Image: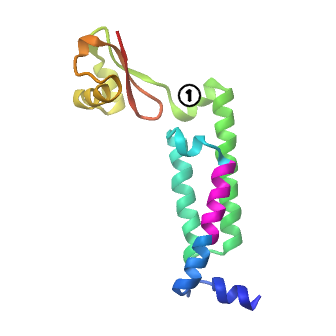
Amino acid sequence: MEVLTKLFGEGKDLNALQMSDRGVVMFVIALILIRISGRRSFGVRTPLDNIITISLGAVMSRAIVGASDFVPVVVCCFVIVLLHRLFGWLIAHSKAFGRFIEGDKMVLFEKERFNQEHMKDALVCEEDIMQGVRKSAMTEDMNKIEKVYMERNGEISSIKK
């Protein structure tokens, strides 16, 4: 037990080596948590997915700097990951739950007109839409665009005519 205390320290009075040791252990735990959470948590980037990134970072840092006890932090991280996985499963299996948690896509442009009401709701301007069109459709010519969407993850995508 004395060896563990020397390696990992106790409380907030940690030296650089003890904090580094804790960082290495939390890194390995983070890899395990990412595998449990699934690819969605760091690939899709919806608000729900951002929550897990922010939450895990905030909670895990407490174990590294000694602000909280190590084991409760790890348990909390596993609970967050399992909750994210449950929500992800529910979103994949229930359109209504998915719309409730992540919202729905919005049509920002169609029939050669910008939808001002949806743009206002999405908090975007025409230049934001044009940036998305240039990125997704590789054009600035809106005559070549059928529709432009604000996706559930906040990205702007377009469909060519």
Residue 11 quadrant: bottom right
16 over 93 or under it: above or below:
below
101 or 32: which is nearer to us?
32
Residue 149 shown left or right of residue 43 in the figure: left
- x and y, in percent, of residue 50 in the image: 50, 47
Outermost residue, front side: 138
Residue 36 visible within the image? yes
106 or 132: which is nearer to us?
132
Q: Residue at x 69, y 55 (%)?
A: 79
Q: Is residue 30 magenta?
A: yes
Identify residue type, mark 1. Answer: Arg
- x and y, in percent, of residue 154 in the image: 42, 34
Location of the N terminus (image quadrant): bottom right
- Residue stretch in magenta: 25-36
Q: What secondary structure is marked by label 1? A: helix
Residue 47 shown left or right of residue 66 in the figure: left
Residue 93 quadrant: top right
118 or 12: which is nearer to us?
12
24 over 111 or under it: above or below:
below
Residue 117 shown left or right of residue 71 in the figure: left
67 over 96 or under it: above or below:
below
Residue 63 visible within the image? no
**Which coloring applies here?**
rainbow
Q: Residue at x 60, y 71 (%)?
A: 24
Please name the residue that numbered disc 1 is placed on: 99
Q: Residue at x 62, y 30 (%)?
A: 97
Location of the C terminus (image quadrant): top left
Residue 68 quadrant: bottom right
Q: Is residue 82 magenta?
A: no
- x and y, in percent, of residue 103 in the image: 50, 30
Q: Residue at x 52, y 38 (%)?
A: 44
